[in-house]
Image (cartoon, rainbow, N blue to C red):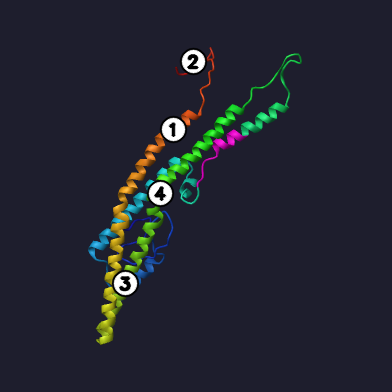
Amino acid sequence: MTTKESTKSVDEGTVPQKGFYGLADHPNHGIISSILKRKNRKFEMTKDAKNMCKNVEAYKASADHLHQALNYMLVENPVTSKHLHEAVRTEPTYRYAGLYMRTYDGVNKKGRKLGSKQDLKEMESLEPVAKVLLQLDAEQEKRVKKQLEHLKPLTKFIGEDYWEYARLRKTYWDALEAYDDAVTLQNKERTEEAERATANAQNWRNECRQKMMVFIEKTINENKGKHAECVLKFRDEAIQFHKSMAESIPAFDVAPDARSAIQPPK
């Protein structure tokens, strides 16, 4: 599958540069293409292997988009959310606000008192508000950790399984190239040694192809159900999180302002 974002092709050898998001690509794809054309070498994967690779590449691209979208739901920061697989991070809004309230409350207690000299009044403490904000921050951090745990099957595919597949695909491509070299040499030399080298290269090619296809089927295709299940768990946990956040905010019995048209819910 070749796109504008990647020059990778399942018809040409690629070097897996292990990362997380993105597809395995070859840094010198254009150079290798031109060399192959000059040599007039035309070898490719078998049709079934090629189709399986195309499906894996398409699945990886979709998994990347889904994973990034879900992480952005956890932490609405385009930079931080892309690195949640490396370390748990949350937006510090609640924490900063709570700490600010506590600091401001301490300063107020040392400042001038309200009211007259005969009737001094203490300012209402902001500690209840600060406590709620810090509780919301703790709830948010707990939620991020739990959701990342739910997403582990999908995260493992993106960060580990896909790149192992890319390594196996590269090895298979190297085996195809080695077999092609062996056949070319056999056609030139016509010796028993060249024939044995060709037979060995053919066996290695077939073995590499088999290993790659078994890995795709057993490790990737058979785990797609787990990938879908973890996303459903993520959805259910998101619903529960909003309930927990609502329960963390106490109900304040405040009389409505007579001048305001906005009335508290009954």
What residue is shown with label 2? Answer: 261
- Residue 224 percent location from the top left of the image: 31, 50
What are the residue bounds of the magenta stretch? 88-99
Res. 53 image quadrant? bottom left
Is the C-beta separation of discs 2 and 4 under 8 Å? no
- Please identify, in this view, whether the residue under mark 2 or under mark 3 is nearer the observer: 3
- Residue 202 percent location from the top left of the image: 26, 75
Q: Secondary structure at mark 4?
A: helix
Q: Name the amino acid type tagged 2.
A: Ala
Q: Name the amino acid type tagged 4.
A: Lys
Is the C-beta separation of discs 4 and 3 under 8 Å? no
Judge the density around disc 1: few (<14), some (14-19), many (≥20) Cα neighbours within 10 Å: few
C-alpha separation, residue under disc 3 versus residue under disc 1: 53 Å
Q: Is residue 207 visible?
A: yes
What residue is shown with label 4? Answer: 152
C-alpha separation, residue under disc 2 versus residue under disc 3: 77 Å
Side (left or right) of 37 relative to 156:
left
* Sooner in the amino-acid sequence: mark 2 or mark 3: 3
Q: Which mark is residue 183?
A: none
What residue is shown with label 1? Answer: 242
